[in-house]
Structures are given as structure tokens and as C-alpha cells.
Amino acid sequence: MKYDIIIVGGGHAGCEAALASARLGNNTILVSSNIKNIADMPCNPSIGGPAKGILVREIDALGGEMANNIDHSCIQVKMLNTKKGPAVRALRAQGDKVLYPKEMLNTMNNTKNLTILENMVEDLIIEENKVKGIILEDSTKIEAKAVVLTTGTYLKSVILCGDKKTESGPHDERPSKFLSENLKKYGFTIQRLKTGTPPRIARESIDFSKLKEEPGDQKEWTFSFFNKPLYKYQNQISCYLTYSTENVHKIIMENLSKSSMYGGYVEGIGPRYCPSIEDKVVKFSDKEKHQLFLEPESKFYDDIYLQGFSTSMPHDIQEKMVHSLPGLENAKILKYAYAIEYDAIDPLQLKNSLETKIISNLFTAGQINGTSGYEEAAAQGLIAGINASQKINNKEPLILKRNEAYIGVLIDDLITKGTKEPYRMLTSRAEYRLLLRHDNADIRLSKYGHEIGLIDDNKYKIFEDKLNNIDQLFQELDNIKLTPTEETNKKLEKYETAQLKDGITLKEFLKRPEITFDTLKELGFIFDYNDDVKEQVEINIKYEGYIKKANKEAEKLLDLDKTKIPEDINYDKIPNLASEGRQKLMKIRPETVGQAARISGVNPADITILLIYLKKENKND
Amino acid sequence: MKETIAAISTALGVGAISIIRISGPESIEKVNTIFKGKDLNTAESHTINYGYIIDKNSEVIDEVLISIMKAPKTFTTEDIVEINCHGGIATTKKVLELVLSTGIKLAEEGEFTKRAFLNGRIDLLKAESIMDLINSKSENSRKQAIEILNGSLSRKISSLRFQILEKIITVIEVNIDYPEYDDIEIMTKEKVKNELISIKKQLEKIIQESENGKILKNGINTVIIGRPNVGKSSILNRLLDEEKAIVTDIEGTTRDIVEGNITISGVELNIFDTAGIRKTQDIVEQIGVNKSFEYIDKADLIISVFNNNEELNAEDLEILDKIKEKNKIIVINKADLKQKINLDNLGNNIVFTDTISDNGIEQLKERIVSMFNLDKLEKSDYSYLNNARQISLAKEAYEIIIGVENQIDSEIPLDMLEIDIKNAWEVLGKIIGETYEEELLDQLFKQFCLGK
């Protein structure tokens, strides 16, 4: 068998990588150990949220699938942070765990150039540090020009529950036992990570009268810039809220040593942002209660996901804990919580393009790179798929900068800082969050999606029309003047805004924080544009000063990214580097001087020395 | 885009012309905002332009010549502006501060040369030596910075940064990333405002202390003035305890500024004696008189001497007028002679001295101690912001905080204002040279119980 590109794994990273590769015209095969688990959501039933929701929009703008797929399979949608500024708003949807994978599989089955194979991958074919294909467990070889590894939590995964340790992936699936050993053999540093998932409760066993309902928004939204809403807000399914009690905390403290974590059965490092309930009780002992969300998993079955209650306690203790929760006194646990340990590689061994530094044409994406989360996985999968395609077609890789996309922040963080815990995207990781808004992901990235070939001309036309409308509306606002007549000023009193002394354009008027398009409408200025066009115009007018400042800062800081560092640079030959800086540079081998400057321990003097050295080398050449 | 940088590029010396060099894409535009004269934006390359450096209130700081040299035919191949200042050390520093206040950054050691090299202006062979230089200089300045900052001020800045991080940034960030946690406090503008007031006060204090620090490091520039022959030089001599200035009965003997140093309560007093101030036809003497007036402007302290034995005349009144806004001590000399002077308009900061004994000199010293709180200055603690860079960073952070405070009551959302607050936090981090990038995330997860 011979293909252009092989994708190993069918999770969120694998699906995006496979679709991108196939859509770009490469003969693609996706190998999954169980086709039933393609695009599976093994943990929480939601997609999006702060920072993550912006990742989903970015995936859409680049021509990926996640946004479209969740638009077709959501059961509840909320816009978060609406009372805050535009930079931090984000969409979150509750996804249907049956519909989401079904839609994705359907899309993949209808994609040209894409084959799906059910099998277990055991090794890679490698010649002269270049990947040539994969070897299946029955020793079949599949050749390819590039391979993308998106193995999720399946590398040597172990499920932990109390003192019980089972070699297994999620859903009792077989783990991949040999691939990570083989990766180690090729020179990859393997680290052990851990995550966990809470119990699932039967809907009919819950007393909802004791819980607080958390409905979706009374308005329809979409993740994709190209979709119209596909649901009616009245048809959404609610989530519910409850709290842990002192009694639960008591049970946990009394049985602490029985949990896998506190009993010492876990070697992997878990994420700080996703602590188990026992962690919360131990580390924040002064808190009387912890918030727990009950989230429906699907409209086709009855499991309710108990968000906030992930644990590695044995089953009998879990029963006691759950039954002490208000509303869950008689709850039936359909699936017990567990912790899972798995192998990941050290992302410092990756390039910006997600190609590994050790083996060329080998790409990795998702949890194997040390991240956590469906959105983080999908974003990397898309980039890995695109760049595998670019590589075998002799094109430049797509590399997004930190001021262009959360995806850029994600990848730059991984390859520059590495990670010791499963990495989750957070707003606080993005220094240019004002530029990386969910509302302008298309404006930031569609051009790349189009250039590469994942956004077709029809879609691009829709985007270009939007841009034209934005320009036009700007001009209209600039051309209309508001004159300081007595009548106008009287009207303005209502809006608690300063009286006009001189005539100002509507554009200047809209700069006032208290003035919106709705105000203009009430003053008789009606603009017939879509809401998304108005939103862009308003944000850009209102926050012009902030945006300009952020752009300027970004330009200054990213100036150093323009200077590339040759792959074969010998840091030992550069005199005067401080020893810590030299060591870090040798370990991480940054691709640009900008990346070098972001490594902690590399000081500004080292950067200057590096710049001078590179300049000198260039001249010598 | 490269940053625009500035530094004083001549050796500092009293009375010498000093040059401030500015290089980078914004140099012309930024200097133009503090320049009164022709519009520098329209000036031709390689021209010299006459005018004044003015401050925010349009007050003239110095009369200058400004050279405009446009890229690429310059030392660094970037746009270069050179300001030729005429006003001596204090004025040059003031001009530099003004330049920095426009957003131009203080150049690091060797940075002009570094740019010249990187932009291809300097010979390849020099590369190695520049690298040596940068390394040793940066190592030195790093050590220096650590030495200077390991005292209480560094702790103060650290704790101020922690306060900003813990009380404002972390809470706002957690509200953004975890909007549905009802047990996490929601940051309100009211709370931020209260924090900002406290932060502002602390920053004010830090800047004030660094001014005190300046006194500790540079001493108090003290100028003795008065009409000829009222006994300025003898006061100086008694302070210095040596015959330095020539003391005669002939008016106008002291034409040059005589300098001496004494230490009072551990603080250096740099004393400048001046030519007697009077109307004169003698050109050489007139220069001395003018210089005396110049010194009044730059002094931290003025000791103004009057003759007890004479009534105030027009020249005395002119002196009193010149120093009315200044930090001053009035010395009534020749107190052993008959009092003819009317003390009514001289204020109450008066010390009496006589011509034949040391009477009053101790009192004069005590007065200086109490004016500058010298007894209360913590002299063992040399941990003040000691260089222009650190002070300009502290002031930058202060300005940002003021800016946020001014906008806090508008409709601008808190998370937008927080971008500026974070910026102030980072600027303060630069002073102590430690910015740990994971600091924010660490604090976030330490302070709050988050996750699913």
C-alpha cells in the first residue's frame, strides 16, 4: 500500500489532519484502532469556551472542520463574557456525543482522496532520519511521503481507579503498547502525563428540583463564519448546577489514601487547571463547597457528565461521594470516574511547523505533544495536516505568529517552553489578546486558508464581501456629520454623553464608549449592514487606540522573528554566550532569533551576541 | 519595527556642550514634539536647526542646535537626531528625561555601535570585540543592578508587583477564563480603583525615595550667592574649613565659581561660590555674574548672603526675586556689626553669622540637615533607583497607572483597562530585571480553585 500522507489516530487532531491533507489533494489514509471512536469526545461534552472558542473560530477561518461540525451537532450554545470587552468574548457549545462523531465520520466518508483503515500502528518506517511509512501490528507496511501522529491518550495508556491499574485507553479500548517505545528508540524524549474524567450519572436518577438550571442563550449562534444557525434556541437542552458539601469533603478526606493519586499509584503529571475533586478539597481546604455542573452528553442517551467531580477514588467511595451531593442522593452511576496516564513526546523536539526535528516528514499533533483539550488537538491537527501537505509538495509551511492567532501562541509555547503538564489554552497565555478576538478570526486568517487551498473561492468571496462592507461602512460613518444643534443636544441628554460643541463625524461620535449603533439608529441614522460588519466597525472605532498600541508592541517584539537561525548552527562556536543561555539554545534549537528571545534563561545580551554572530556568518558566506 | 533609542553621547562635564544622540525610526518625529523652532519633520537631511527644547508646559528648558541626519547615510544607518545642549549637566539630564518621556528608550551600553554593526556600517573585524564589550558591560551592569537593587527598594517593587498581580490581574484574568465560577470574586471597577490608589501612592513614594537616593548618591548642589563683599567666600571657607576662595575687601574678587565639598550627616554638599551679583561694566565680571544666575537655576539649595550692616538695596531685591521659588537659607552675615538690615521681607529661614568667628556656621549646617531631612534618610540603604533607566521605568509605570485611573469611570470594559495594568506590571518587572513568564499562570492556579 502506498499513500501520500498517513494519519495515525482518529481523534480531533487526526480528523482535522486527515481532512486538510485530503482536501489539499493528497492521497490520504487515516489509521484508527477503532472506527467507532473517530471524533469521539471521551471527556467533557462541550466545545469552545474562553480562548478555546477562539481556537475553534480560527480553525474555521483556515478551512478546518471543527466549527462546522459542532454547528451541526450542538444541543446548547452560550456566548461567554458578554459583559466584558470584545477581546475576551467566546462561544461555547454543548456537543451531542452521538451526533458529533457521526457528522465528522460522514464528512470524512464524503471527502475525496481519504481512506479510513481500522488497525493498530506499531512502528514507523524510517530511512536516514526520514519517515517513509508505518508498520501495522500484523507487520503490514504502508508507505507514504509523510506521517502525522495523533495518538491522543492511547500511547501506553493506563486507567487508574483506586489501587486498580488497567492497561487500557478510554472506553476499554486497547492501548498502543509499542509505538512510544519505538519513538524512544528514534530519539524522542517520552514524558508521562495524566488526566482524569468525572463520573456519568443516569438522568432519570437525578432530582432536578434541587438543582439550578443553566439554560443556553436565547439567541442562536454559530462557530463557523460560513454557517447560518442550524438550531432553534427553544430546542436547547439545559445544564444544571449543584455543589459539593462538607459531608462529601469529609468522605474524601477519610478515604484520601484510597485514591490513585494520593495512594501513590500515579507517575504522570496532571494539569493544574483540571484538578480532581480530592485535589480541590486538599489544596483549598478553607472552601466549604465546590461548584459542579451537570452536563447532558447527548439527546440519544441518558448520561449526564458531572463536571468538576473528576476523581481516581475506587468505585465504592465514588458511590458514597456522589450520593452525598444535593440532587444526587439516589443517583445511579453509569460510568465511574477514572484517571488516565499516557505517554507524550517532549514538544521541544518539534519545529514551528509541527514537523519533528529528529525525523523529517514526521508530524505530531494533539495530546502526543503534551496538550489537553479537543480544540487544542484539532488546531494542531489542522496545522500538521496542512504542513505535511506543504512539505511533500515542496511548499513553505504555514506558521502563525503570536499576534496572528491563538494557534500561533499554542504552537510557539509548546516548541519554545515545552510543557510539564497537559497544556491547555488560556486567555492569559496570549499577550496580544486584543488582536486575537473571536470576532475577527476570519479577518486574521482566511487569507491563509485561501492561499493554501482549504477555503474555496466561493467561501472566500463571502469573506471578501464582508471586508468590502466593513470598508464601506467606515466611509459612510466618516462622511456623515453630526451638527451641534439644540435639538440634537437635547436628544443626547438621554444617553449621558457629552453635549456637542462642534460638529463631529459619526465615526468620531461612535468612539464614545457609551454610544453604539443602536444609539445612532435612535438618532435616525440607519445603516443597512449585517451585525458582524457593524461589530467589526464598532470595535475598531472604539478601541482604535488600544489596537494600535497592541499592533505596535507586537511589531517591535516580533521583529526578531524575521531573523532565522540556521538548523545546523553550532552554539559552541559562538564566543561569549552565557552558559545558561548556551545550554538552553542547544537544547531547544530555536528556529528564529525571536523564538530564542522567548526562551527563559536566554538573556538580552545573548540575543545581541547571537544576532552579531549570525550577521557575521552571513557576510562570510 | 526597531525601537528608537537615546543617550547622552558626550562625557559629562560642567559647562561643556553636551550632545544627546537619538537613533531609530521615530527619532525625528518624537524630538519634534519637544522642540520649538522649525518643524523638524520637514527639515532636510544633514542640516543643523536652531531652537529650544520645551517641556510639557511649553517652558523653555534649553537653547539648542539640532542636527538631523536621515537614514541611511548615518552612523547607525537609521534616522539620527543629535541635540546639542548648552545648559550644563542638570539641563542635559533634564533634556534627556524629556526625550525619554516621549516614549524613546534609553540606549543600552554599546547599543549605537551594535546597531551600526548589525546594519552593516562597521567593519566585520570589529564584531568579536563588540561581542566582548557587550558581554562584559552587560555582566557588569547586571552585577551592579543586583548590588543596587538587593535592598529594600527592590523588595518594595517586588511586593508592589505582587499586589498588582494578586489583587487585580489574576482576578480579572480568572474572571475571563472561568466566567461561570460563582464563588470567585468578580472584579469591579470600584475595587480596581481602590487598589490603583494604593499602588499609585506606593509608586509615588518609590519615585520620591529615588530622588532622595539621588541626593545620597550625587549630593546636594549648593550655591552661595549675594552682592559683592557681603562675605560669601568667608562663609564658604568656614564651611570648608580651608582658605579656598580669595577673601579680600575689594568687591568683585570671586569671578570664577569655586567648588568645594563637605559632608553633612553623611551627605555630600557640593558648594559653588559665585561672583558677587551687581551691575558691572567689566565684561569679564559680567560673565561671572551671569553664570551665578545660571547656577541659581540648577541648585538644590541656595545660601543667600546679606550684609547685616547695610540696608537692602536694588541688587539685593533682584537676588531675592530670583530665588523666591527656590530652596533657600538666608544668611545674615556680619551680625557682629550694627544691624541696619530690615528683616521683614526675608522670611523665617534665617541664620546669623559673623565675620570674625565661626558663630552661626553650625546653625547653618543644622538648618541644611533639617531642610533635607538628612538625619532621617536611611543612609545604610543604598537601594534606590539609581539610574535614569530605572527612574524612567518607574515613572512610565506611574503614568500608565494614572492613565488607567483617568479612564476607569468610562464605559471601557475592565479587561481592556487590565491590558494597561499588565503593562505597568511588566514595566516594573524590568526595573528589578526579573520577569518570569509563568508568574501569572502560577498565581492563577495558586489563588483559585479551578477546573472541571
Image (cartoon, rainbow, N blue to C red):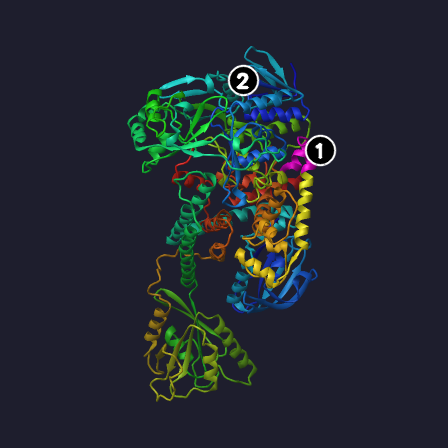
Residue A585 in sight: no
| Residue A478 % position (x, y) | 66, 54
In the image, the segment drawn in magenta is: A445-462
Q: Toward which corner of the image does residue B336 lie, by quadrant?
A: bottom left
Q: Secondary structure at mark 1?
A: helix
The answer for how far apart the CA atoms under marks 2 and 1 are is 34 Å
Which of these two is toward me, A526 or B176? Answer: A526
Q: Toward which corner of the image does residue B56 lie, by quadrant?
A: bottom right
Instruction: Decide: is A323 above or below A413.
Output: above
Query: Is B379 left or right of A186, judged from the image as shown?
Result: left
Which residue is depicted at the point 56% across and 33% down?
A: A56
Which residue is depicted at the point 62% across and 40% down?
A: A444
| Dot 2 amino acid type | Lys
Dot 2 corresponds to which residue? Answer: A36
Query: Is A108 left or right of B427, judged from the image as shown?
Result: right
In which chain is the residue bearing label 1?
Answer: A
| Dot 1 amino acid type | Asp
Q: Toward which corner of the image does residue A10 lie, by quadrant?
A: top right
Dot 1 corresponds to which residue? Answer: A457
Q: How busy is the neighbourhood of tag 1: few (under 14 within 10 Å), some, or many (20 plus)? A: few
Instruction: Decide: is B37 above or below B209.
Output: below
Which of these two is toward me, A276 or A595? Answer: A276
**Quarter in which the C terminus of chain A is drawn:** top right
Asked if badge 2 and badge 1 are on a common chain, one would say yes
The residue lying furthest to the top in this view is A138
The answer to whether residue A461 is magenta is yes
